[in-house]
Amino acid sequence: MKKKITILPGDGIGKEVTAAGKKVLEQIGECFGHEFIFDYATIGHEAIELTGNPLPDETLKKLKNCDAILFGAVGHPKYDNDPSAKVRPEQGLLKMRRELGLYANLRPIRLFDELLGASSIKPEILKGADILFFRELTGDVYFGERGRKNGNDTAYDTMIYSRYEVERIAHKAFKAAQTRSKKVTSVDKANVLESSRLWREVVQDVAKQYPDVTIEHMFVDAAAMKLIQNPKSFDVVLTGNLFGDILTDEASQIAGSMGMLASASIGDTVGLYEPIHGSAHDITGKGIANPLASVLSAALLLEISFGLKEEADAVIRAVAQTLKEGYRTRDIADASTLHEKLLGTEVMGNVVCNQLRMLVSVNS
Ligand code: IPM
Ligand code: MN
């Protein structure tokens, strides 16, 4: 198979972790005889510094002409305490999602058994948890009308959804549920918000087309509580952009660390794959970031965009084996981690590649 992959390292640790993700893709190409052609483009703070624009036209053009995108992170601390900045790194990410029509954000919460102890949640509550979030990604308060009034002293953002936006992501969630435990939990705030009432109405309609799937509706406040109290009670979770953003950061604790969580953003054309973590400037340049979220994002890329299930499974098995042998980055280490098995970003990526080579040579 011959495919063009654009790498968008972005800011902060984005550069370090996508280097590992890319290496793993190259290793897969070598082991399974695929030709992956890589190209780079700029986004976020880096792009602002280079061009004044967080998503330059040249980047967008490249993204529209490739087969899949591996993305790192965007952000820079200098904007966090400057609410008046008009041009911001995150605008690049949001515009990219919108321009590429990436309306469905899949965030699998996969807990590797080896990391049961890495979470602050009790192992007996966690063991066996396996959740797939469908976060709507191109609507909601992220893209609704916003502004200031009253001489700048009042600000508003509009939470807005249209039927077709809810329908298309609901279908994706129900179809995924059919291949899993056949249960969808739709999360909203329909006791208060009109947009949530439309959300619930549409999800109820779509559910009728999937009689084999059980549908449950939950308010977002209750869902936030239940995720921690009983994560095993969830299978597929379907929710809007803002609620999905918040709940998946919370759910990352089920997987032990934000550094373990991958995501896929898909729509009708090219797919984009990225860790759910941010640019983490506090650890940037230290070479200690966990690259496994990017590596697992590469696995999602192989499976979803290229249909390479066997290759994707090989990546996941290589990660599992790496963890089984005791290798850890700092975020997932505990008192039992041997000093020589505490690895930096680059070496962790190399260890996964070695595991891949061993796995594939054993099977062939
Ligand atoms: C995410 C991030 C983004 C979001 C930010 C960086 C705009 O938090 O992908 O979860 O809120 O969607
Ligand atoms: Mn987020």
Image (cartoon, helix red, strand yellow):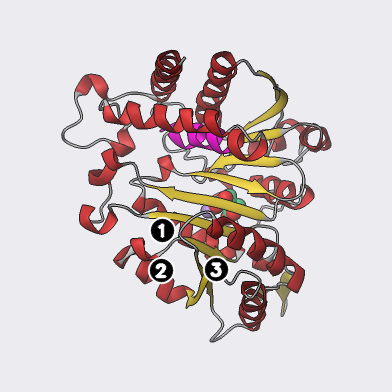
- Residue at image position (43%, 18%) is 363
Looking at the rendered structure, the kind of residue marked 1 is Glu
Query: At numbered mark 2, what does the secondary structure look like: helix, strand or loop?
Result: helix
Of label 1 and label 3, which has the lower sequence position?
3
Q: Residues within 10 Å of mark 1 (few under 14, many from 20)?
A: some
The answer to whether residue 157 is above or below residue 91 is: below
Q: Select label 1 or label 3 by which is in front.
A: 3
Main SS of the magenta part reads helix
| Cβ atoms at labels 1 and 3 below 8 Å apart | no
- Residue at image position (40%, 30%) is 317
Q: Quadrant of the N terminus?
A: top right
Residue at the disc numbered 2:
224
The answer to whether residue 184 is above or below residue 289 is: below
Where does the magenta region start and end?
Answer: 289-300
In the rendered structure, does residue 101 fall within the stretch colored magenta? Answer: no
Looking at the rendered structure, the kind of residue marked 2 is Ala
Q: CA distance from mark 1 to mark 3?
A: 29 Å
The answer to whether residue 272 is above or below residue 3 is: below
Residue at the disc numbered 1:
250
Looking at the rendered structure, the kind of residue marked 3 is Asp
Q: Which mark is residue 212?
A: 3
